[in-house]
Image (cartoon, coloured by chain):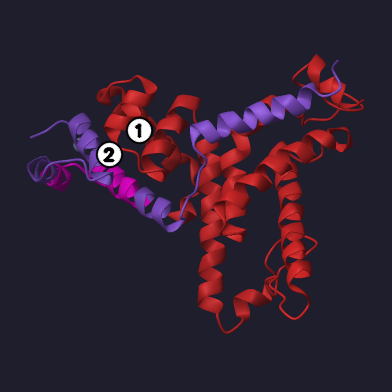
Chain colours: A red, B purple
Amino acid sequence: MEIAILTKSPTFSPQTMEHTHQLEPNKWVDRYSDYLFNYAVSRISDTEMAKDLVQETFFAGLKSAKNYKGDAAERTWLIAILKRKVIDHYRKINSKKGKAEVRMPQSFDEESGNWAEERVADPYSQAGKSQLENEELGLAIQECIAKLPKKQSMVFTMKTIQGISTEDICNELGINPSNLWVMIHRARTALMGCLNQNWF
Amino acid sequence: MISCEEAAEICDKAQYDEVSKWRYLKLRIHLLFCKTCAQHSKKNTQLSHLCQKAELHSLTESEKEEMKTELEKKTLVGKS
Ligand SMILES: [Zn+2]
């Protein structure tokens, strides 16, 4: 079984060695789960379902690891899998409800999994446009958070995204408030540098 | 006047509403005179706005641990 290759070494590159990108499944959750989750939630507001799709994406990635050619970055490759999962999810809903009620968003491009341009130009253009922009912004921020050292990204995420109190974070991570604020400061400074200037 | 370090600290805490009015006032005064901190503070506040606007979502640490366990289980398939 191909999957057995994975157990021998955590890092592997299929076929030849000339590929620049490698898959490291043991790091997927830390590196990409929030990024993928953010995308999934933006398409499917059901957070439990979104979480399941992320998990399924990792499984599918593992299963098709042998097809990974190393020409796309790991993150790009994984989000492409997730996009398919989102489309399949809409298909399932549609087939359950019957053709009378098509709930697949109108301008959803099945090939790329992206919202088509026309969505921006429709009567709801303002809403559509800002939704797209916010989604893009969310992914950009998650991408930058993923580049932070593990503990900084944890503290920043708990504090900023999950809104957990300083006291609770300190208790959970066994740090004191001044440690926490130092990490928050470093994380925020790094994010300001990482996020593209045109967001500011 | 407070130091630039203290200004940065107050500015970070202000992003989470965890600073007293009095300390916040001290920060505002510092910013009137210190261009570097004023710039940093402006960007820091904008970062907060961006995070809000993006409506970020994230999984909890325990959810991530669960995912890792599930993924490991799948990885081990085919071993025995
Ligand atoms: Zn200063």
Q: Is mark 1 within 8 Å of ligand 1?
A: no
Task: Tell me if mark 2 has few (under 14), some (14-19) or many (20+) residues whose alpha carbon lies within 10 angstroms of its own.
Answer: many
Determine the residue positioned at 36% across, 54% down: B49
Residue A125: percent from left, percent from top:
56, 78
Q: Residue furthest bottom?
A: A123
Q: Chain of mark 1?
A: A
Q: Mark 2 and mark 1 in contact (Cβ < 8 Å)?
A: yes
Q: Is residue B31 magenta?
A: yes
Q: Chain of mark 2?
A: B
Residue A65 falls inside the magenta stretch:
no
Residue A188, image quadrant = top left
Instruction: Name the residue that disc number 2 marks.
Output: B12
- What amino acid is at disc 2? Asp
Residue B78 position within the rendered picture, expressed as x and y whole percent measured from the top left: 86, 22
- The span picked out in magenta is B27-46
The image quadrant where one finds the C terminus of chain B is: top right
Residue under label 1, please give it. A184
Residue at image coords 80%, 61%: A111
Q: Residue at x 83, y 30 (%)?
A: A19
Secondary element at tag 1: helix
Q: Which type of secondary structure does the marked residue at label 2 adopt?
A: helix
Q: The N terminus of chain B lies in which quarter of the figure?
A: top left
In the displayed structure, does residue A118 sit left or right of residue A183?
right
Work out whether residue A147 can be spotted: no
Disc sitting over residue B59 in the figure: none
Identify the residue at horizontal 50%, vertical 32% (top origin).
Answer: B61
CA gap between label 1 and label 2 equals 8 Å
Q: Which quadrant contains ligand 1?
A: top left
Q: Quadrant of residue A58?
A: top right
* Residue A80 to residue A90: above or below: above
